[in-house]
Amino acid sequence: MTGSDASSRLLIEIAGLGVALNCEDEEFARLVAGAYSSFLALPGTPAACEFAVHIAPPRGTDPDEDVRVSLADGKWQIRRGDFEAEFDPRARQGWVRHTANPYSVDTVLRIVHTLLAADAGGFLVHAAGAILNGRGLILAGASGAGKTTMCRLAPPDAVLLSDEICYVMRHGEEYLVHGTPFAGELGIPGVKVSAPAAALYLLARGNQHRLVPLKPAEAARQLLRCILFFAEDAELAGKVFNSACEFVRRTPVYRLEFQPELGVWELLK
Amino acid sequence: MSGLMERVTQKALALGVPLSVHLDLTWRCHLSCIHCYLTERNGRELTTAQLVRLLEELAECGTLFLLVSGGEVFLRPDFFEIVEAARELAFSVRVKTSGTLLDDEAARRLARLHVAGVDVSLYSHRPEVHDAVTRLEGSFARTVEAVRRLVAYGVKVRVVQVLMRMAEGEYSRVRELAAELGAEYSLDPTVTPRLDGSRSVVRLNASHAAWRKVFEDPELDARPEHCPLSPEPQEAAQTAPEWDSLPCSAGHTSCYISPSGDVYPCVQFPLALGNVTERPFREIWADSPAARRVRSIRVADLPICRSCEFLNQCSRCPGLAYMEGDLTGPSRLNCEQVFARTGRRPAPLAE
Amino acid sequence: MSELYVARHPAAAWRRLEDEVIVMAAQESWLFTLNEVAAEIWEAADGRTPLASIVRDRICEKFEVDFEQAYRDAEELLRALAERGIVLLSETPLEAGTP
């Protein structure tokens, strides 16, 4: 059932990309496996990169402080009070040293995936996502914009990809939106499934439900504000910028002004 | 199988017509059933235009019965477009779905398209057990709701239960539930290995005792659900086995096409015959070396099975044999079922 | 005699297999096979062409049969098929769009 035959190797697959975590501590591996259960990959799945995960004694610093990501010598250095990690994109491997908190793994995964996605012409975005009638809908916005609300109002036949972070990946000539295990307030990890990205909605509160089509330039500007972005690196920024522009060229984008009540989803059908 | 259906199948066989085709539109699914045989989820999918073109080719080749499935078919935005195209080409269309995304509108549309039927899976009559299999909380309720909606619109629904260890004693309750809902019921006794050959899911199979009960139940037609035209396992026959008889219809009068357009003899027989984006289906079906190889096999070509005393009682799946590594070898899961049924071990299981 | 129009039932599924046509009636899952003559009529049954024309143009010459007999046989067959729900019979043209 878990993504590993050896007791401590877990393969977590998001948007078709597997990140292998080789945990020196079995108990910790079990914790992580439990937290990401629906995103564990089958044992034979190829991994996009391998991480060695070490437990280190806590240093008593703040897990809520911002994570710092920088590039040194071709390797990404990831630092926050409660952990440090390194990722070598060319060797496709790295290590993580942290306190026994499965959710620091969450941060590392988010960061690694933003790097993997950028190289593949995709990006992670602060957005709720849903599949309705086979169409992938992305509902983007910052904290408090209404992602959780929209999820709560979703009709029963909508498949919720996530209430917090969606994964947009280039797939030939089109874009797919994938579910992620990165949970928001609802605390429900998303579903591991994807759909062709049919529309992007930038959430805004309004007096009534309204859809306002956005032109590509404005759409790209607003989308970029919602894209997950950790590192101050020019090359990475360039890739993400291009991906966002390409995406809005191919996908209809709207500002969705809404009131938190049923009926808003009718606009999205 | 009725006499007429038998005759039609024989004619299709003689003409080399793929009478039945199982077409998966996608391997994506929002459920994560513990026993699912699919491994590759995010592969390439045929476009709407490619699918319509494929349907036209299949109609030209003589295909009549089409099973549309996945993954979850309702995750394709063009699902109804495809079914409409199929009905316009006069296919008899069955749809297989979890039913969890099937709203009232969808039920109505399926009814108006006059689909031959809809298959849904139920693993238990108990919601918590069913949901533990699908790993989607609330899926049982949604599926049952879907069955009610479809039946209300006059669509013929079949509840298919794959028999699994944690629910092996409950199949008669599921059968009752199906009857209550106005649906037919069918039991698939076998959890088959994953398409990549991994056999980890095989441990989910029912016990031998449960299998025996199932095989002895006169009211149950316990056959693998994707083998509508396979020969029925008969009682131990006094007659000699038919040396030139066919192992099963896969590759003869039926085949499977994956979401990316790969053609296989059957969904459980991952020997690729060709890809429809590279060659016309007709050519793949008639000419590919792999297709010819599969079609050349007769009972006489099976070194172990041809001399097995249980030959006439076994529903040997060539796909499972292929996945075990030998196209002409035994299929151990079927040997196990014979053991369960008779209490005696076929040669491959000899101690 | 008044005109008779015949259309394949929209719920039917069918396929030609050489000289015969196999028909599946969706509702009851009944299987029918239509012989050469019946198959010819079936394929022409678009709901807009009168049965008389179908018989005259497609049956009489091809199968070298007399019109009156052929028409009677055809009508009898089609009424039987209509009872089984695989064709629609009407004295006015039927809507196009049957499979």
Image (cartoon, coloured by chain):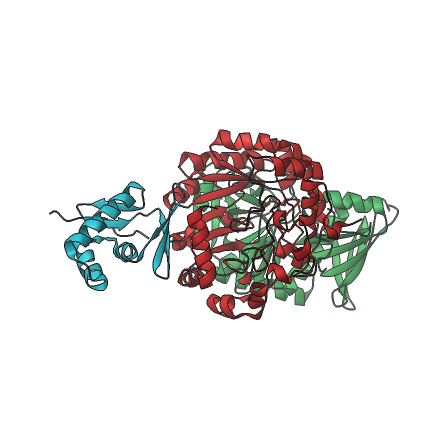
Residue A20 location (% of width, % of height): 75, 56
Name the residue furthest right: A57
Q: Nearer the viewer, residue B157 or A154?
A: B157
Q: Nearer the viewer, residue B259 or A17?
A: B259
Q: Is residue A68 left or right of residue A163?
A: right
Q: How many labels, in total?
A: 0
Q: Is residue B302 visible?
A: yes
Residue B8 location (% of width, % of height): 43, 54
Q: Is residue A11 left or right of residue B228?
A: right
Q: Nearer the viewer, residue B159 or B15?
A: B15
The chain displayed green equals A
Residue B78 location (% of width, % of height): 45, 53
The chain displayed red equals B
Name the residue furthest left: C1
Which residue is rendered at x = 70% and y = 49% of the image?
A40
> Residue B64 appears in which quarter of the rendering?
bottom left
Q: Nearer the viewer, residue B236 or B127?
A: B236
Which residue is rendered at x = 35% and y = 56% of the image?
C21
The chain displayed cyan equals C
Q: Is residue B77 visible?
A: no
